[in-house]
Image: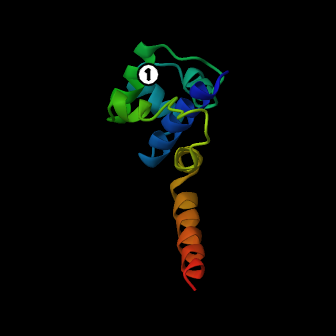
Amino acid sequence: MNDITKILGQRIRYYRTTKGLSQEKLAELSGCHHTYIGQIERGEKNATIESIEKIAIALNISLSKLFEQLGVQENDERNVPLECYEFLLSKTKEEQDHLYRILLEMDKYKNN
């Protein structure tokens, strides 16, 4: 699958885990099958817009939040902030907090 499919899946996984939902519970709330949710999160399935809308409603987030900055590429240059954002989205809340603390520590030494 393409990068957009993988990124969208990572975002769905992030919001699902942040809300403390299992794939099974998200499937129940969205009316999708739990294996389909797993395939979307892993970027193995190209979800329909209808399925994505059902998932967004079940997660209580807007479609625009899921699609924010998706596919944006300026002059084929690397977009490091966006890459960092996508990287963080693929991590658990605990991992995100840990990575943020590491960045803060690194920033302290940069100014010395």
**For residue 81, side relative to residue 60 (left or right):** right
Residue, disc 1: 52
Residue at the location (58% across, 17% down)? 46
Residue 107 image position (x, y, % from top left): 55, 74
Residue 43 image position (x, y, % from top left): 63, 27
**For residue 53, side relative to residue 70 (left or right):** left
Residue 53 image position (x, y, % from top left): 38, 21
Q: Amino acid at mark 1?
A: Ile
Specify the quadrant of the image occupied by residue 58.
top left
**For residue 25, side relative to residue 43 (left or right):** left
Residue at the location (61% across, 33% down)? 76
Q: Nearer the viewer, residue 87 or 96?
A: 87
Q: Nearer the viewer, residue 74 or 82?
A: 74
Q: What quarter of the picture does the N terminus occupy?
A: top right
22 shown above or below 88: above
Q: Secondary structure at mark 1?
A: helix
99 shown above or below 88: below
Residue at the location (41% across, 13% down)? 50
Q: Which residue is outermost to the bottom?
A: 112
Q: What quarter of the picture does the C terminus occupy?
A: bottom right
